[in-house]
C-alpha cells in the first residue's frame, strides 16, 4: 500500500471547509467546476455513499463514508472511474486543522495497488486542493 499525502491551507474556518466536502451543492463550486456536466451525489453519513461523475470527460470517483468527525476528519473509500473501468478500492482520509486563521487540509490517499504510478493521483489531488483553497 502506498500513501499519497498532500496538504493545503484554506483561508476559511474548519467547519466551512468540512461542509464544502459533505454537501453536493458546495462540492460543485470547487471540485470540477471546469467540467459543467459533472454530477455530485453525497449521502454524508457513516456507510453513506458519494459519487462525482463527468460523462463528457469520462471520469468519476465514488465510494462510501467510513468516518465523519465534524469538523475534524472525513474517512472514505475511493474508487476511480475511467469510462467503464473501475480502480481497486483505495482509502482516503481528509483532516481539517485550524491554522493561521484558516484550515490546514491534509489528504491521505492510500493506494492498494502495489507499485502503482501515483503521479496522476498526486496531480489530481493538488488541482482539487488548489480550487478548494479559493474558498473564503
Image: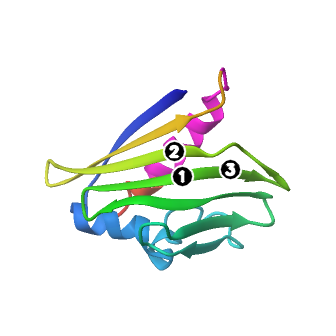
What is the span of residues highlighted in magenta in the rendered image?
115-130
Separation of residues labelled 1 and 3 (CA atoms): 10 Å
Asked if the residues shown at circle 1 and circle 3 are in contact, with their CB atoms under 8 angstroms apart, the answer is no
User: Foreground residue, 23 or 56?
Assistant: 23
Residue 129 part of the magenta segment = yes
The answer to whether marks 1 and 2 mark residues whose Cβ atoms lie closer than 8 Å is yes
Q: Which residue is mark 2?
A: 91
The answer to whether 87 appears left or right of 122 in the picture is right
Mark 1: which secondary structure? Answer: strand
Which residue is under mark 3?
A: 80
| Mark number displayed over residue 51 | none
Residue 15, picture quadrant: bottom left
For this orientation, the residue located farthest to the front is 47
- The quadrant the N terminus occupies is top right
Query: Which label sits in the foreground, 2 or 3?
Result: 2
Q: Of discs 1 and 3, which sits in the foreground?
A: 1
Q: What main secondary structure does the magenta stretch of the protein show?
A: helix
Identified at 60% across, 33% down, the residue is 112
Q: Which mark is residue 77?
A: 1
Q: Quadrant of the C terminus?
A: bottom left
Q: Is residue 75 visible?
A: yes
Going 34% across and 70% down the picture, which residue do you hit? 19
x then y, percent, for residue 90: 58, 43
Amino acid at each position: 500500500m502506498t500513501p499519497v499525502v498532500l496538504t493545503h491551507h484554506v483561508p476559511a474556518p474548519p467547519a466551512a471547509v468540512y461542509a464544502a466536502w459533505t454537501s453536493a451543492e458546495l462540492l460543485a463550486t470547487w471540485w470540477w467546476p471546469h467540467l459543467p456536466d459533472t454530477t455530485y451525489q453525497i449521502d454524508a453519513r457513516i456507510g453513506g455513499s458519494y459519487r462525482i461523475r463527468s460523462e463528457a470527460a469520462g471520469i468519476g470517483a465514488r465510494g462510501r463514508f467510513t468516518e465523519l468527525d465534524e469538523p475534524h476528519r472525513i474517512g472514505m473509500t475511493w474508487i476511480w472511474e475511467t469510462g467503464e473501468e473501475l480502480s481497486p478500492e483505495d482509502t482516503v482520509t481528509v483532516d481539517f486543522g485550524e491554522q493561521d486563521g484558516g484550515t490546514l487540509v491534509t489528504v491521505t490517499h492510500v493506494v492498494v495497488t502495489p507499485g502503482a504510478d501515483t503521479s496522476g493521483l498526486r496531480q489530481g489531488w493538488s488541482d482539487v486542493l488548489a480550487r478548494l483553497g479559493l474558498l473564503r
